[in-house]
Amino acid sequence: MKPQRNYKYHYVYRITNIITNMHYYGDRSCNCHPSEDIGIKYYSSFTNRLFKQDQKENPQDYKYKIIKIFETCREDAKQLEVDLHKKFDVKNHPKFINRANQTSSHFVGGSNSMWVKKALETKKKVGADGLTGFKRIGNKISETKKSTIWKDTIGKKLSLNQSIKMNTEEWKSTVGVLANKKRKNTCNNNKWKSTIGKIKINKCIETKNKIGIDGLTTNQRATNKRNKTINSDDWAKKRIDTNNKMSKTRIENKLSIGCNNPNAKHINIYNANDIIIYETFGTFKSICMTYSLPYNALIESSNNNGKPIFSSIYKPAIARLIKNGDIIYKGWYAKVIND
């Protein structure tokens, strides 16, 4: 049993929404004066989070009244709350949001009441369909969330609100950071890896290796789908177009390489009739590669002040040039131009 804490004040309060004119009665213990507590630090014991959140976001819509303050004990405040709940029958009154009536020891309709215990036993009992009440309710909720009507109305609204909330800088820098940090710490915890993490991995592997109605596993099905996509005409055409676009871009990039290089050289390439075929400025190699010119021979020519290429070669070398198709470049030369 937890040790009883000693508080200076015990009080009964009433919260009223002045827009809807709905009320809530409750009791509370604190060390600060109740006027500095209710509606400032404390927003009721009501389990609905939206009720508390709305008070924080729209304080102008709520009115707080301290019914009575006790400096004796919590039981006195509790008894007054019991009397008020009984007087107004708050759990059945249309103007009160209290879900149960407070009694001296527990809520009528609270977790300690007999009918709640009986309801829990009923929900845990396995029915004719092999499901417990909890499982049946869970399935019903799941089916509701999967329905088109739910997705287009409540689900859509919730998703939109969540998306807007998570994209705010305030959320990213506070809740988002803490959530990611907590998830990372959890996933890196050895205890998690050896228990929940291990179970999740095994379940994932089991799902992927499970054979379906078509006699294939998830991995095999995914592989077949990928192969079908790759072998389709649309994919092949798209791939060819992408490659052509990349090749064109690559050539353009090669032709522009070195233009901004302070050490780039201005080299002209001439044919055997002394006619300029290509002018390069830091793009000598890329042009040779692009147009299949004999780069090694031409760079040697430029280093030898424009000596014609393939002009003094032996017969075996000529045969090799003919075979490679480079004999047409005999007499060509490259020369560095000093600007």
Image: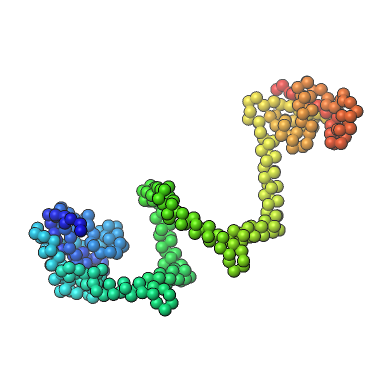
- Left or right relative to 39: residue 9: left
Residue shown at the point (49%, 59%) measured from the top left:
203
Please provide percent x and percent y for residue 124. Answer: 35, 72
For the C terminus, give its image quadrant.
top right
Vertical comparison of 212 with 289: above or below: below
Position of the N terminus, as image quadrant, is bottom left
Q: In which quarter of the image is residue 9?
A: bottom left
Residue 154's place in the image compared with 330, above or below, is below
Q: Which residue ends up furthest to the bottom in the rendered image?
A: 128
Q: Quadrant of residue 114?
A: bottom left
Q: In this view, does 300 lie above or below 66?
A: above
Is 334 positioned to the left or the right of 204 in the image? Answer: right
Picture coordinates of residue 338, whole percent (x, y) = 72, 21
In the image: residue 230, left or right of residue 71:
right
Residue sticking out furthest to the right? 315
User: Residue at image x 41%, y 52%?
Assistant: 192
- Residue 94 visible to the viewer: no
Residue under the image location 73 percent in, 23 percent down: 337
Taking the image as drawn, is residue 264 in sight?
A: yes
Q: Is residue 221 above or below residue 301?
A: below
Give coordinates of residue 297: x percent, y percent.
Answer: 79, 28
Q: In this view, does 256 lie to the left or right of 118?
A: right
* Render colour scheme: rainbow
**196 and 149: which one is in front?**
196
Towards the viewer: 113 or 60: 113
Position in image of residue 126 (x %, y %): 39, 75
Please report the residue visible at 47 percent of the width from the left and 57 percent of the height from the top. 200
Instruction: Name the outermost residue toward the front.
Output: 194
Query: In the orientation shown, which residue stands out farthest toward the left?
Result: 72
